């Protein structure tokens, strides 16, 4: 590192510490087309390949505000001058911007953001802003150019060993350069010497790419992406200090390596997949981890995972309250590239900050900064509140700059939920070891349950933390993440996985116009578990601007086939005259009909398979629709599928199953969901499981939700956005530890509705008389939890 002194006019002089950075970045020329003032008009903004965006992003990220307490500034000195290579062959990245709704919850039509509608890499030059004759080419060969420049820097700079190396694998043109080095033994050894001399740290960043479509000489196809990953590690980390070596890779790139990594599921599933990948002998990460210590996986979803391979621990960082729906649906809300680059920039910033060795490397903090900065970047869109001379590239450059960090600090001070982060830590030992987010709840579990009911789930799992304005990194305020589906909040990993799986299926159907047949799903659960409500909340999450109400038909009330035909006609009318896909709920579809169990099933086969139902005069087409079959007699899909006779217990039961068309009906289902209830699980032999922590949590969350709907008068606003439920703690314990609710969650809600509140207080004397209470709960055990009533 070199030091010099600079100062702005009228301000005290501060030392400037230059940090040499050897950045091998993109060789793509970026062309962005921005809508002009006239309809159909676009203005082109061009950034040449010899001016990589990531260089400017790193330089801006290292800047400090004028009121910084430091007496020095960090400034990168990039070893490679891409100006020397401006006329080398490269591709073009074309981005077309357009206006989109700000987010899925935005109510104002004029609340729009400028985001990317279409993006692709081209080998042809479409837009040019070059004027006059281009300067002569200084290097015909990129590999020779790289080695010549690096050798020159080593010879002329005494601080070369302090430099940081960043290999940013972003596009196929740059990748071809690196492949040439990797394939030649002499070049590979020379590259390894250069990387080994970078004592400041080495970062290998591998973004999503399509190399698995290429063919290799050995005939390998699907393994090419995995081979590229291993070759890149071998190239970059030979002889490098592993403590300051970081691999940043996108989850999609790993998926293309053939690795199974969950998408949009529970955090636990994702972590178990990654840990399993590390422990797998097929991936050979155990052989690689001796060369680098830190692994970062950037997800397509808003977040990233960090693993310290040496200490066998890590964390998942994401924003549970950010508008994930908008970020995951570019067709409706547009794309904002830059997530991966923000993570890379933030990690490089952390390496620069810790070069003097006085502070430990904090990759977790760097990722929190990268995630929060990108979420802010997405929400703002491009060229927001900028002048006529604005450029969309400025938004990339400012993503982690001092102005944006100041805005994020203000958001934390104002407790804006959309920028609050969770950072779930975990560790692992032997293969097959598991962990749960609930491990983070302290020993006072009972006190946490009371907090959930009185203050809400968000507040109960939020722990305010102080943060330093100097080298600001957003703190992780949410200790236990939850998933939100409409008005439902889930913390059970198994339940989140089930909901997520169905949500992905519904999401695909709603966004696949050529899926012309109805989508059939079945939902099961104990009576009162809220089966139809659960699916409505899933649809509310994936289609938040949906306006139409579901069509609900209770088959237990149908007396003839004509009633079902009339129901299908209503579905057809809605499909024809509404722009939304109808949601059709067939409640108690497993009811008896015509003297047979499951007698209705055979009448659904044609509509489910071909979208056609028979009327009195002809056959009619239903159109696109979501058929939700809500069971009334079975509490789970397995129980439904086993009755009658699906398990082939004897020939008579097997024949009965065929007569009622149970196998045919099940084969037409494309998904199912088992909804957990509020009562302990009962096994096949009648044994009732004890009330566990997860059931207590589920009851606490449902009780809070029921109070919000039916006991508004007991709520008090304690501060902006925080509603305190004035309910007695003994009463909370009675609700949570009830031995059984006769009608499931309906019973819990009924007790709240029948209660009479005293001056805005929900106290034991608010409960209905014991005779009414017995209708919904074991009154004796319920009242035993209340002090003075035992």
Image (cartoon, grey):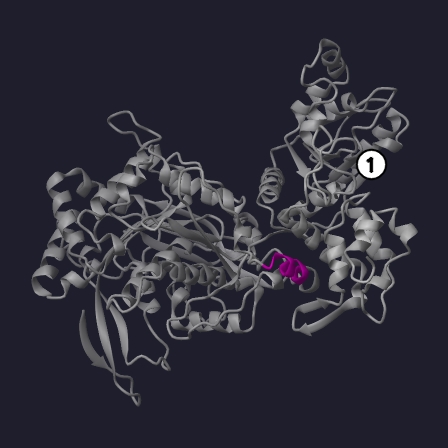
Q: Quadrant of the C terminus?
A: bottom right
Picture residue at 65% right of the left edge, 48% below the top:
543
* Residue 445: in magenta span: yes
Picture residue at 48% right of the left edge, 69% below the top:
408
Q: Residue furthest top?
A: 651
Q: Nearer the viewer, residue 594 or 427?
A: 427
Asked if residue 433 shows in the view, the reply is: yes
Task: Decide whether the magenta segment is chiefly helix, strand or loop.
Answer: helix
Q: Nearer the viewer, residue 501 or 552?
A: 501
Specify whether 541 is left or right of 208. Answer: right
Residue 134 spot, x, y in % from top left: 20, 58
Q: Nearer the viewer, residue 57 or 491?
A: 491
Which residue is label 1 attached to? Answer: 553
Residue 267 spot, x, y in % from top left: 51, 47
Q: Nearer the viewer, residue 162 or 342?
A: 162
* Quadrant position of residue 365: bottom left
Picture residue at 50% right of the left edge, 64% below the top:
380
* Residue 359: in magenta span: no
Residue 644 spot, x, y in % from top left: 75, 20
Specify whether 786 is left or right of 506. Answer: right
Q: How many marks?
A: 1
Per the rendered image, the range of residues in magenta is 444-452
Picture residue at 51% right of the left edge, 60% below the top:
421
Q: Quadrant of the N terminus?
A: bottom left
> Is 203 located above or below residue 501 in the figure?
below
Residue 184 spot, x, y in % from top left: 14, 39
């Amino acid at each position: 590192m070199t030091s010099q002194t600079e100062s702005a006019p009228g301000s005290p002089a501060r030392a400037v510490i230059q940090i040499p950075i050897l950045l091998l970045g993109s060789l793509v020329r970026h062309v962005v087309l921005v809508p002009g003032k006239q309809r159909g008009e676009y203005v082109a903004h061009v950034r040449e390949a010899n001016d990589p965006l990531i260089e400017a992003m790193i330089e801006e990220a290292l800047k400090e505000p004028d009121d910084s307490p430091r007496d020095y500034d960090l400034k990168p000195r990039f070893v490679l001058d891409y100006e020397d290579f401006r006329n080398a062959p490269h591709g073009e990245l074309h981005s077309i911007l357009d206006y989109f709704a700000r987010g899925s919850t935005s109510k104002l039509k004029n609340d729009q953001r400028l985001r990317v509608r279409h993006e692709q890499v081209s080998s042809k030059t479409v837009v040019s802003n070059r004027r006059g004759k281009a300067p002569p080419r200084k290097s015909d060969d990129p590999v020779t150019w790289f080695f010549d420049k690096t050798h020159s820097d080593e010879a002329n700079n005494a601080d070369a060993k302090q430099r940081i190396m960043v290999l940013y694998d972003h596009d196929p043109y740059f990748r071809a350069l690196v492949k040439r080095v990797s394939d030649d033994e002499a070049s590979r050894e020379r590259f390894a010497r250069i990387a080994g001399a970078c004592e400041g740290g080495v970062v290998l960043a591998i973004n999503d790419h399509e190399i698995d479509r290429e063919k290799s000489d050995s005939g390998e196809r699907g393994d090419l992406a995995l081979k590229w990953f291993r070759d890149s590690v071998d190239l970059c980390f030979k002889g490098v200090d592993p403590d300051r070596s970081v691999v940043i890779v996108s989850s999609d790139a790993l998926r293309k390596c053939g690795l199974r990594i969950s998408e949009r599921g529970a955090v636990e599933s994702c972590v178990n997949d990654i840990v399993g990948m590390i422990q797998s002998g097929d991936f050979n990460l155990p052989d690689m981890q001796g060369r680098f210590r830190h692994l970062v996986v950037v997800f397509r979803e808003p977040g990233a995972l960090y693993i310290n391979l040496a200490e066998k621990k890590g964390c998942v960082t994401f924003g549970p309250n950010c508008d994930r729906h908008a970020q995951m649906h570019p067709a409706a809300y547009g794309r904002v590239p830059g997530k991966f680059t923000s993570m890379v920039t933030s990690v490089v910033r952390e390496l620069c900050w810790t070069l003097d060795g006085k502070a430990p490397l904090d990759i977790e903090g760097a990722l929190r900064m990268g995630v929060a900065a990108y979420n802010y970047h997405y929400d703002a869109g491009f060229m927001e509140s900028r002048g006529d001379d604005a450029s969309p590239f400025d938004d990339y450059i400012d993503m982690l700059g001092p102005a944006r960090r100041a805005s994020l600090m203000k958001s934390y001070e104002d407790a804006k939920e959309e920028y609050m982060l969770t950072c779930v830590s975990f560790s692992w030992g032997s293969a097959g070891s598991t962990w749960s987010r609930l491990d983070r709840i302290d020993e006072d579990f009972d006190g946490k349950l009371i907090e959930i009911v009185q203050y809400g789930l968000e507040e109960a799992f939020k722990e305010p933390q102080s943060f330093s304005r100097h080298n600001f990194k957003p703190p992780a305020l949410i200790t236990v993440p939850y998933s939100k589906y409409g008005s439902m909040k889930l913390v059970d990993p198994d339940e989140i996985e089930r909901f997520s799986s169905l949500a992905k299926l519904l999401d695909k159907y709603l966004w696949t116009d050529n899926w012309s047949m109805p989508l059939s799903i079945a939902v099961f659960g104990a009576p009162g578990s809220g089966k139809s409500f659960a699916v409505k909340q899933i649809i509310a999450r994936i289609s938040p601007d949906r306006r139409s109400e579901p069509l609900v038909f209770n088959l237990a009330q149908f007396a003839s086939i004509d009633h079902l035909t009339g129901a299908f006609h209503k579905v057809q009318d809605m499909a024809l005259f509404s722009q939304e896909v109808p949601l059709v709920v067939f409640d108690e579809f497993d009811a008896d009909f015509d003297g047979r169990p499951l007698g209705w099933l055979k009448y659904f086969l044609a509509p489910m398979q071909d979208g056609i139902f028979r009327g009195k005069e002809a056959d009619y087409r239903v159109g696109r629709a979501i058929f939700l079959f809500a069971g009334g007699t079975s509490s789970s899909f397995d129980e439904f599928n086993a009755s009658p006779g699906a398990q082939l217990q004897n020939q008579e039961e097997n024949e009965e199953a065929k007569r009622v068309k149970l196998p045919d009906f099940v084969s037409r289902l494309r998904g199912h969901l088992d909804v957990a209830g509020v009562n302990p699980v009962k096994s096949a032999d009648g044994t009732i499981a004890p009330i566990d922590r997860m059931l207590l949590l589920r009851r606490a969350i449902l009780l809070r939700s029921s109070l919000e709907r039916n006991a508004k008068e007991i709520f008090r606003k304690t501060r902006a956005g925080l509603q305190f439920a004035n309910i007695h703690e003994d009463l909370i314990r009675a609700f949570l530890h009830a031995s059984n609710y006769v009608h499931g969650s309906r019973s819990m809600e009924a007790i709240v509705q029948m209660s009479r509140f005293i001056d805005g207080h929900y106290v034991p004397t608010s409960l209905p008389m014991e005779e009414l209470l017995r209708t919904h709960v074991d009154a004796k055990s319920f009242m035993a939890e209340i002090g003075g009533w035992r």
